Image (cartoon, grey):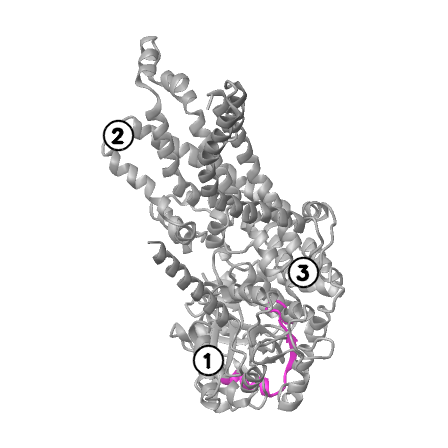
Amino acid sequence: MRRRWTSVSAAALGAVLVASGCGGGGGGGDQVEVFSWWTGGGEEAGLNALIERFEEDNSGIEFVNAAVAGGSGTNAQAVLEGRLQSQDPPDSFQGHAGAELLDYIEAGYLQPLDDFYDEQGLREALPDQLVEQISYDGSVYSVPVNIHRSNVMWFNPSVLEEAGVEEPPQTLDELIEALEAVEAETDAIPMAVGAQWTVDHLLESVLLGSLGPDGYNALWEPGADWDTPEVAAALEDFEAVMEHTQEESAAEDWQEAAQRVPEGEAAFNIMGDWAAGYFDELGKTAGEDYDWAPSPGTEGTYMWLSDSFTLPVGAPNEEAARTWLELVGSKEGQDAFNPLKGSIPARSDADPQAYADSPYLSAALEEWQAGPELAGSFWHGVTVDNRWKNDIDTAVGLYLQDEDLDGLQAALHQAAQAE
Amino acid sequence: MSTAEPAAGGAAPAAPSPAPRRRARRGAGRAAAWLPGLLLVSPSIVLIAVFVYGMIGWNTALALSDKHAPIDEGSFVGAENLIALWQEARWPAAVANAVVFTVFFVGGALLLGWLLGLLLEKGIAGEPVLRTLFLAPMAVSFIATGVVWRWLMNPAPAERATGLNALFVHLGLDFLVNDWWTAPNLGMAAMALPAVWQLSGYIMALFLAGFRGVPEELREAARVDGCSEWQVYRHVVMPQLRPVTLTAVIILGHMSLKVFDLIIAIAGKQIVADVPAVYMWTMVFDVRDPAKGAAIATYLLLAVAVFVVPYLVWTVRKERSEGR
């Protein structure tokens, strides 16, 4: 009996050692471990297309897909934090390009990629303003693989017709008029929103629409002044829009809120362009069941967010990781990934043919390649770090309870000063 | 437990002083008596010392430091974090939510559990079946309960109603259509409904055992003295149930203060249903502020201690008075 226990525990110990050995990575340059939260739907399909491509081109390197499911990245970020702190980084990990990576950069977890950008000609391939907006102290730390747009207004053409709204509204004033018309003339919800974070999302579109790209971008300098009449006016527009939202919004996530538009239950919804992929999944037809326009007042500006890949300090297989980043930054890689993910490539030289199947994507790509003005999405981690973002979220959540607009402005101002 | 030690120590001098050699052998014999026991429990003592008390100590040290990012060194700043929480808008609101939730959850589950227990005790037909039915929700996790009740408690108004609101509309009870957990102020009372649903069966089982533990002779005696059935319960049975009630309050109370999964499943991370545990999660895993997260954890521990410590004191005192 005792001997059996000894052998069992020896086997268990051996298994633990093997497992920890694997966790440390091979380090022989024969594998690359890539960490992401792409585990389902189009995201997973896009990642798999990249992996397939990578393995084809680099038959000597084994690809280890370390994706962590759940919580649109929050679970993955908790796991990643632990690995970075215990100095066991993956070879490359996914993160939203921009200030969301600041915590990692300041902690010294990431290598600057300036040389890599020069080598790969990424400074020419990516829009200048994009490179500028993802730089921190003059250096870039990640390679953006895609671009999503945050400032999209989805609307239902037949509900608009019923309400007597002929053209999709182009300014916030027109939007508020249209919302009033929908309220008066139809049974539909004028503006569908969902849980608290979708209100944050709406807020950034209203701020951009009211302040314009320069005014909006200036809000995200640490210590920026939010205590201005311009911000007050923008928040009044925000309040006017919020008056026409459905009362049960807190109980809905973005999917439930957004699908009210093609279902004919709501006239408008402001949500990122991932909604187009969702509507396709539901079998809705663009131009018929739903249509889109830039959110009012933001014509010509692309409020962007982007998934990007990084090179951690102490990556066990740095050479292989650079090979991975090369693919991620390349035209071929981005054109393989993005049609499946439902986003457009960050490079401006993508092949439009690859996106011809999706009416939304081909229109979006055309606009992106025409060189629009760029503004970073705060809610999706481009312009603010996690603390600032959370402060804004809390301020918006408290506003939804007490509806105190001055209190909201004061809290937003204070959040900017805290940086 | 701790009462056993002085009793054993006190017994030694009282014994007639034996010959030295015998005493040594008896010492060895005594070691043989307690050593295996100690060896048996020592792994759990060590584990608890490290992973419970050690972690509490670490958490407290964090809460008293200014380690506001994982990379900060963090130096001692006293109670700064603990005080700062009360000066913001979110924390007092989260505490108020937790208090409303606790009052309705503990009150509701106690009342309903007691009532169900009483009904079963009075010998309702089909008791075993009902007992199982009422206990069944205990087998469901708060997450699963939350997902179902999120749908049941959909706050849509009458024209778009689903869930319970749709049922009310269907039955012509439109005045009952309400905002459920999305209502400001008392929304957390609605949030307590799923928790009451889930736990009242368990409380019923506790009370049922309590009722059954009251000897029939006592009730007989009261009846002979002319008590009505209500008076029997009011003056004879209920006082005997005090320990059961206290146990129930402690179990429900500490669950209620720590509530996290139910809130996340129903409301997600929204201020309308913010509670300290959700706030703590946000601070630790979203904002990555160890000191602030630890400060909230410290308050949570203190709040639970308010329930648990009096219970421990009471138990120890009772054991002592019973001479155990």
Question: Callout 3: residue from which chain?
Answer: B
Viewer can see residue B160? yes
Q: Nearer the viewer, residue B31 or B292?
A: B31
Q: Which residues are magenta?
A: A362-383
Viewer can see residue B105? no
Residue B175 position (above or below residue A49): above
Is disc 1 placed on a helix, strand or loop? helix
Residue A46's disc is 1
- Left or right? Give the position of B67 relative to B180: right
Please tell me whether residue A367 belongs to the stretch shown in magenta.
yes
Q: Nearer the viewer, residue A254 or A53?
A: A53
Is disc 2 placed on a helix, strand or loop? loop
Q: Callout 2: 10 Å neighbours few (<14), some, many (20+)?
A: few
Label 2 to label 1: alpha-carbon separation: 61 Å
Residue marked by disc 2:
B124
- Left or right? Give the position of B152 relative to B68: left
Amino acid type at mark 3 = Ala
Please state the total of marks drawn on the protein image. 3
The mark that comes first in sequence, 2 or 3, is 3
Label 1 to label 3: alpha-carbon separation: 34 Å
Residue marked by disc 3:
B69
Residue B303: where, in percent of width, then height? 58, 39
